[in-house]
Image (spheres, rainbow, N blue to C red):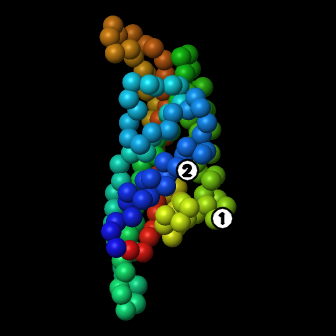
Amino acid sequence: MPSSAPTVKAALLALLESLYTSPTLVCWGPPSTYQPSDIVSIGNQVISFGAAPMATTRPREEIVETAVTVSSFAADSQQVATERAFELYDVLADHFKTGPNETLGGACREAFVSGFEVEEFVTSPAVGGGVMGRTTAITATVTTRTRI
């Protein structure tokens, strides 16, 4: 059986598009030129394998860690940007707390948010320097387990 990583990423995209409404941008990879105040993007994946269960077919336990970054921009306040980013993050984290949400619509056996990292920074215009506003990005790790 092939890797579950592409299927997991596609399932995450469908999930995020259902969880976040416009004007929040949901994208596979980094956003392009359209960048609203709130962005949710699905990024890199790290794949590892657990011990194979004792079975005649010896399927492998594939563990996929997918980075999902939620970010929020505020023109005047880092606190406003951070609080909004945590609101966006909570939507994702809370989704996996109830069944049957832990299977990503059948894309995996188990899915959960296993951790996150918070980054706060000043956002400057591309040309001319100066401060345009503040951004907070929370990169959550969504860990999935699939027998392949």
The answer to which quarter of the image holds residue 7 is bottom left
Q: Nearer the viewer, residue 56 or 47?
A: 56
In the visual, does 127 lie left or right of 41? Answer: left
The answer to the question of whether label 2 and label 1 lie on touching residues, with beta carbons closer than 8 A, is no
Amino acid type, label 2: Leu
Task: Determine whether 29 is above or below 134 in the image.
Answer: below
Residue at image position (38%, 60%) is 5
Q: Which residue has dot 1 on it?
A: 99
Q: Of circles 2 and 1, which is in front?
A: 2
Mark 1 Cα within 10 Å, few/some/many (few <14, many 20+)? Answer: few
Amino acid type, label 1: Gly
Task: Determine whether 50 is above or below 133 in the image.
Answer: below
Asked which secondary structure carries label 1, the reply is loop
Q: Position of residue 97 (x, y in %)?
A: 64, 59
Q: Which residue has dot 2 on it?
A: 15
Task: Determine whether 24 is above or below 139 in the image.
Answer: above
Answer yes or no: is residue 50 visible.
Answer: no
Residue at image position (54%, 46%) is 16
In the visual, does 110 lie left or right of 129? Answer: right
Q: Position of residue 73 (x, y in %)?
A: 52, 25
- How many angstroms separate mark 2 from mark 1 (CA)? 14 Å
Mark 2 Cα within 10 Å, few/some/many (few <14, many 20+)? Answer: some
Residue at image position (45%, 39%) is 27
Answer yes or no: is residue 131 visible.
Answer: yes
